[in-house]
Amino acid sequence: MSLRTIRILLWLPLVGFLIVLGLVFTGLIRPHDASIRSQMVGRPLPAFSLPSTRPRQPPLTSASFADGKVRLVNIFASWCVPCVVEMPQLAQLKQAGVAIEGIASRDTPADSLAFLQRNGDPYDRIGDDKTSAAQIAIGSSGVPETYVVDGKGVIRAQHIGPIQPQDVADILAAVRDAQ
């Protein structure tokens, strides 16, 4: 081996390290989106029937979504801190005329109602999903998540995480598109 080849071989580990460091740094600046999108977008809501968290209200059923009315389905829980963050935006959507149905995930009716009393209640109806069976069937991976459901009961859009003020316009556009 020549002296030149040996010098090149001595620098290769440093060059390799700098390339790996550059890739790691790039990943830290622009992290990969780790959110899990529902495979149910574009499909009908799966069949479910959830008892109401409110006394004397009918259950929340998937069949009730095929009534010609576009609405949101918001999955929340009283123990969910980000759910508190999105309550003002849900109230704003409600004021804009959007119907909102809630699914309380892994909660008790008493805790759900206390949460809504503290943070506001934008929901027309709330289904009690004690085992998260309906949440999982819809394709939700956590709380909060919100879905736009058209008047035929088909999921048209999904919003993962708490609805922030800058998200309201996009959700209103998704509701208009679903009509």
Image (spheres, rainbow, N blue to C red):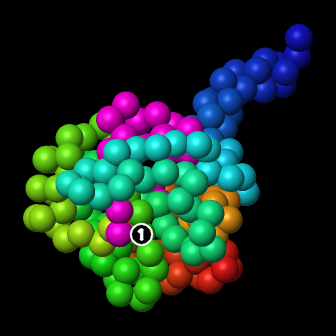
Q: Residue furthest right?
A: 1
29 vs 124, nearest the viewer: 124
Amino acid type for the residue under numbered disc 1: Ile
Q: Is residue 104 rendered magenta in the image?
A: no
Q: Residue furthest top?
A: 1
Q: Is residue 7 visible?
A: no
Query: How many numbered markers are drawn?
Result: 1
From the viewer's perspective, tell me whether residue 117 is left or right of residue 95: left
From the viewer's perspective, tell me whether residue 71 is left or right of residue 113: right
Image quadrant in which the C terminus is located: bottom right
The spot of residue 135 in percent (x, y) is: 47, 42
From the viewer's perspective, tell me whether residue 154 is left or right of residue 72: right
171 vs 154, nearest the viewer: 154
72 vs 127, nearest the viewer: 127
* Residue corresponding to mark 1: 100
16 vs 44, nearest the viewer: 44
Q: What residue is shown at x 37% (from left), y 31% (from top)?
A: 131
Q: What residue is shown at x 37% (from left), y 80% (from top)?
A: 94
Q: Is residue 129 visible?
A: yes
In the figure, residue 86 lies in which quadrant?
bottom left
**Residue 47 higher or lower than 64, as above or below:** above
Range of magenta residues: 124-146
Image quadrant in which the N terminus is located: top right
Q: What residue is shown at x 62% (from left), y 63% (from top)?
A: 66
Q: Which structural element holds mark 1?
A: strand
